[in-house]
Image: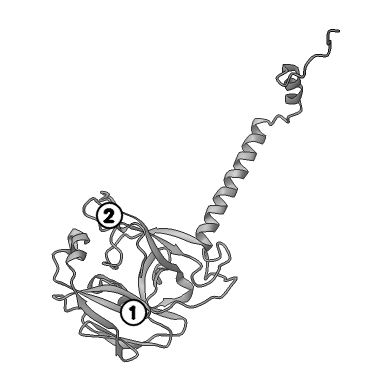
Amino acid sequence: MENTTAPENKENPEVIAVADTNKPVLSKKEKFIKEFKSFTFIIIGVLAFRSVLFEPFKIPSGSMIPTLLIGDFIIVNKFSYGFKVPFSDWFSDPTYVTGPSKPERGDVIVFKYPKNPDLNYIKRVVGLPGDTVEVIDKVVYVNGSPIEAKETDGKKILEDMDEKYKQYNFKFFETHTGKATHISQIDVDNVYNANFYRTVIPQNQYFVMGDNRDFSADSRVWGTVPFGNIKGKAIAIWFSLSIPWPFSQDEQEAWSFRPWRIGKIID
């Protein structure tokens, strides 16, 4: 006997049509609101991530040469000293959920410039609260003892250095600032920054210096950094590209791409 039962047709257009009629149809206004909400959540998520976890910065000046060169792009760990309430540092000192712990001597930190909080600066912590700091003949003393520094060959450093600095008579030193081992440099011919009078660092304040000692406006010039101004600790270089834009206030003078610096850990 012939089977009169029709086989199941999964591609039956009538079935598809019925299914489609069950889907809600959004108006243009509803679609816009839905997309706007999604976009807003993404933006808030990105800003919150930058506020409490990690944030990228670009190095515009040579004050931290040779540790950081003009055009280095760095990652800053925003929770190095404790987790903050998202966006709490936008209008005042940050509110911490955990900690906070304090920066250590030798940390490279990004902070709001005390004279103009709209500007971000990056320097190395040299003096902690209660320390005494002084500079005698370009030797940095902390609590009466010189920071350990041994002269080293700077030929390789000069190859990477920005052109505007290659004309100076630099000496390079392997320097031990706290737990950090890094290279600092001085201009032998510059006598103006040879000394800094002994000073006591106030509580909750930090004395910071650039590794490019004679080309850094730092705590020797404008004073100490309050803890509340500190955004986080610089941890690594993720890109390095210097482009001389005509209207930029950055110091770069020539195009320079340095792929060998990508992934470099900041000591």
Q: Is residue 99 visible?
A: yes
Across and down, in percent, residue 46 comes to: 53, 53
Specify whether 199 is left or right of 163: right
Judging by the rendered image, the residue that carries numbered circle 2 is 258
Q: Examine the image and state in which quarter residue 4 appears.
A: top right
**1 up-or-down from 242: above or below:** above
Q: From the top left corner, tell me how far across and down residue 58 is, in percent.
A: 36, 58
The structure residue drawn at horizontal position 22% and vertical position 60%, both measured from the top left corner, is: 160
Q: Give percent across and percent down for residue 101.
A: 51, 77
Q: Horizontal placement of 79 versus 15: left or right?
A: left
Q: Which residue lies at the image location 33% right of the left edge and 79% below the top edge?
A: 177
The residue nearer to you, when weighing 90 against 189, is: 189
The secondary element bearing badge 2 is classed as loop
Q: Can you give x and y, in whole percent of width and height, for residue 120 in the image?
A: 39, 64
Q: How is the image coloured?
A: one colour
Pick whichever, 18 or 98, lies toward us. 18
Alpha-carbon neighbours of circle 2 within 10 Å: few (<14), some, or many (≥20)? Answer: some
Q: Which residue is mark 1?
A: 177
240 horizontally vs 3: left or right: left
- Secondary structure under tag 1 reads strand
Q: Marks 2 and 1: CB-CB under 8 Å?
A: no
- Which amino acid type corresponds to the residue marked 1 in the rendered image? Thr
> Left of 41 or right of it: where is 267?
left
Q: Residue at x 76, y 28 (%)?
A: 22
Is residue 249 at least partly visible in the picture? no
Determine the residue positioned at 51% across, 63% down.
90
Please tell me in which quadrant of the rendered image residue 122 appears.
bottom left
Quadrant in which the N terminus appears: top right
Which is nearer the N-term, disc 2 or disc 1? Answer: 1
